[in-house]
Image (cartoon, rainbow, N blue to C red):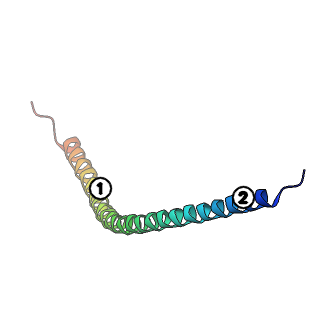
């Protein structure tokens, strides 16, 4: 059944209102996306700072690990020397 002129005008007006509402929603979504982008940028900057701090800590831990390895080796050598000396000594009466 064909539409009357009044029905076409009403449908056109309704579609125009829907289009305007969609554009308003898009503007709101765009604004929210810009807020989120700003927050993500701030978070990214903080994570970069944390990453740099962790790199520094990692370097310090590597240094400590190296020193502990060295000390472990020295303790092993000392134990070997002490064991050898104990084997060489005569037993006490």
Name the side, left or right, on which 23 lies relative to 46.
right
The local secondary structure at tag 2 comes to helix
Front in this rendered view, residue 63 or 36? 36
The residue sitting at the top extreme is 93
Q: Quadrant of residue 45?
A: bottom left
Q: Residue at x 31, y 62 (%)?
A: 66
Name the side, left or right, on which 60 lies relative to 22.
left
The local secondary structure at tag 1 comes to helix
Front in this rendered view, residue 43 or 90? 43
Q: Quadrant of residue 41?
A: bottom left
Residue 29 in the image, given as x and y percentages of width and height:
53, 62
Residue 35 in the image, given as x and y percentages of width and height:
43, 65
Q: Residue at x 51, y 63 (%)?
A: 28
Residue 44 in the image, given as x and y percentages of width and height:
41, 66
Please name the residue that numbered disc 1 is placed on. Answer: 73
Placement of the C terminus among the 4 image quadrants: top left
Q: Residue at x 76, y 59 (%)?
A: 6
Residue 79 in the image, given as x and y percentages of width and height:
24, 47
The residue sitting at the right extreme is 1
The image's mark for residue 62 is none
Q: Label 1 neighbourhood size at 10 Å, few (<14), some (14-19), many (20+)?
A: few
Question: What is the C-alpha distance between the residues marked 2 and 1?
Answer: 91 Å
Tell me whether circle 2 and circle 1 mark residues in contact (CB < 8 Å).
Answer: no
Please name the residue that numbered disc 2 is placed on. Answer: 10
Name the side, left or right, on which 2 lies relative to 7.
right
Q: Of discs 2 and 1, which sits in the foreground?
A: 2
Q: Label 2 neighbourhood size at 10 Å, few (<14), some (14-19), many (20+)?
A: few
In the displayed structure, 24 sits above or below 1; it is below
């Amino acid at each position: 059944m064909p539409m009357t002129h009044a029905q076409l005008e009403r449908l056109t007006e309704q579609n125009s209102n829907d289009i305007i509402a969609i554009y308003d929603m898009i503007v709101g979504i765009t604004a929210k996306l810009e807020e989120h982008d700003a927050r993500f940028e701030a978070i990214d900057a903080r994570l970069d700072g944390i990453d740099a701090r962790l790199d520094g800590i990692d370097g310090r831990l590597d240094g400590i690990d190296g020193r502990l390895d060295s000390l472990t080796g020295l303790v092993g050598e000392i134990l070997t020397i002490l064991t050898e000396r104990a084997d060489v000594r005569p037993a006490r009466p």
